[in-house]
Each structure stands twice: as structure tokens, then as C-alpha cells.
Image: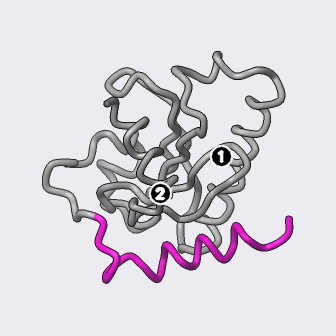
């Protein structure tokens, strides 16, 4: 089963500990690693191959949810800005990476895409460490817009 499909299936049955909340277009989830605290993803539900496979209304909903999730992360952290990336080259199903970027990042990383970080040795998501941040993002997303 492809990774995004698997993560969405787990979210649907309440078995994905990284779920922040259900959004109109899919699932807001914390990233597997947290080299940038608050790194999260938006997974569509239903899963599609790419943004181009959504009709106009579903596409607009997905992109609005992406921005709302970024707003929540921005307000829940001391990030300076947010980066959004929809790639799909390694995992060929729609998903958006949402990266908070911090003034405290090393200069050689801060001005580069988040992919320049060492993902293999990054701090993994752990509820006991990152759970308060996950819950803060959820609270912000549940507030009326």
C-alpha cells in the first residue's frame, strides 16, 4: 500500500498518533521527524495522485486548508515564516509538506529548502515531546475562522 494511502487509512480508524485533526480536505498530521518543530503535512482524503486530479472546488478547499494549517503552525510556534511544498516525486500521491522556518536556524540551512537538513538523523516525532505542540495546532485549527 502506498505510504500516503496507508497514513490516511490509519487516520480514518484513529490509529495514526501524528494526526492533528480532520480538515475539510483531508488530515493534518505532524511530520515523522521534527528537525523544524511544527513540521507537518496535509494528506488528502480521499487520496489522489496529484493536485491536478482534484476538481476546482476540491482543489480550492485543499489549498485553503494548507494555508490554514500553515497559519496555525505559525501562531503555535515562534517561526518567522512558513514554507509549503507539494512534490510527489518519491511518494506519488498528493500531500503537502508545511515547514515552519526559524530565525534560529543555522545560516547554511535557513536560506535553503528544508530538504537540506539531515532527515535520517533528525529528531523523530514523539507524543511525549511534541504532543503539546500538536494539541496547540489542533486548538488553533478548531477556532472559527
Quadrant in which residue 47 is drawn: top right
Residue 121 percent coordinates (x, y): 13, 55
For the residues marked 2 and 1, what is the alpha-carbon distance in whole angstroms? 22 Å
Residue 51 percent coordinates (x, y): 62, 23
Quadrant in which residue 68 is drawn: bottom right
Most extreme residue toward the front is 13
Number of the label disc, if any, that sits on residue 66: 1
| Most frequent secondary structure within the magenta stretch | helix
- Do the CB atoms of the residues marked 2 and 1 lie less than 8 Å apart? no
- Residue 17 or residue 13, whichever sits in front: 13
Q: Quadrant of the N terminus?
A: top left
The magenta span reads: 125-145
- Residue 100 or residue 94, whichever sits in front: 94
Residue drawn 37% across the image and 41% down it: 6
Q: Quadrant of the C terminus?
A: bottom right
Number of the label disc, if any, that sits on residue 13: 2
Residue drawn 50% across the image and 58% down it: 100
Amino acid at each position: 500500500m502506498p505510504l500516503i494511502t496507508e497514513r490516511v487509512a490509519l487516520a480514518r480508524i484513529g490509529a495514526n498518533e501524528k494526526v492533528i485533526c480532520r480538515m475539510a480536505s483531508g488530515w493534518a498530521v505532524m511530520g515523522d521527524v521534527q528537525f523544524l518543530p511544527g513540521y507537518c503535512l496535509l494528506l488528502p482524503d480521499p487520496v489522489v495522485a496529484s493536485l491536478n486530479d482534484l476538481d476546482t472546488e476540491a482543489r480550492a478547499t485543499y489549498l485553503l486548508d494548507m494555508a490554514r494549517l500553515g497559519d496555525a503552525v505559525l501562531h503555535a510556534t515562534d517561526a518567522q515564516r512558513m514554507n509549503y511544498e507539494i512534490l510527489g516525486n518519491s511518494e506519488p500521491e498528493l500531500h503537502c509538506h508545511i515547514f515552519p522556518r526559524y530565525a534560529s536556524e543555522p545560516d547554511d540551512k535557513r536560506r535553503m529548502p528544508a530538504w537540506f537538513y539531515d532527515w535520517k538523523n533528525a529528531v523523530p516525532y514523539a507524543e511525549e515531546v511534541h504532543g503539546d505542540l500538536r494539541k496547540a495546532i489542533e486548538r488553533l485549527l478548531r477556532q472559527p475562522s
